[in-house]
Image (tube, grey):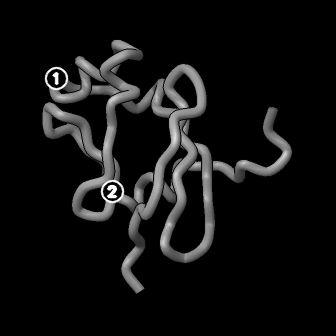
Amino acid sequence: MFLEVIKAEYVTEFKVLIFFNNGVSKIVDFKNELNGSIFEPLKNVTFFKSFFIKFNTIEWENGADFAPEYLYEIGYSNENNG
C-alpha cells in the first residue's frame, strides 16, 4: 500500500493534523522543516495555512510540498496533545 494523505487540518502555528490512508493520523510540526527557497513563503502563517491536498499529499500554491512518507516519519501521535 502506498502511503497517502487523505485529509489535513491546520492546528496552530506551523502544526498540521494529517490523516493517512492507513488509518493513522499524526500531527506534523513544520517549524523546523521550512528550509530552502521554495519553503520561504510558508514561514508566513497566513500563507502556511492555505495548504490543500494534491497528488496524495499536502501542497501550497507556490508548489511546495512534502512526500507523504516523510510527513508520516516526522509526525507524532495526536493522542494526549493539548
The residue shown at (46%, 56%) is 7
Q: Closest to the observer: 33 or 45?
A: 45
Disc 1 marks which amino acid? Answer: Ser
Residue 56: mark in rendering? none
Secondary structure at numbered mark 2: strand
Residue at the image position 47 percent from the left and 49 percent from the top: 8
Labels in figure, total: 2
The answer to whether the residues at label 1 and label 2 have Cβ atoms under 8 Å apart is no
Q: Which residue shows up at 46% across the image and 26% down it?
A: 32
What amino acid is at disc 2? Thr
**Most distant residue in the right direction:** 80
Label 1 environment density (alpha carbons within 10 Å; few <14, some 14–19, many ≥20):
few
Q: Quick one: label 2, few (<14), some, or many (20+) residues within 10 Å?
A: many
From the viewer's perspective, is the residue at label 1 or at label 2 nearer? 2
Q: Quadrant of the N terminus?
A: bottom left
Residue appearing at x 54%, y 59% in the figure: 19
Q: Position of residue 38 (x, y in %)?
A: 17, 29
Quick one: SS at disc 1? Answer: helix
Q: Report the front residue among 31 and 82.
A: 82
Mark 1 highlights which residue? 37
For label 2, the residue is 57
Q: CA distance from mark 1 to mark 2?
A: 20 Å
Q: Position of residue 39 (x, y in %)?
A: 25, 27
Sequence-first disc among 1 and 2 = 1
Image location (x, y in percent) of residue 56: 31, 64
Decide: is 8 above or below 61.
Answer: below
Quadrant in which the C terminus appears: top right
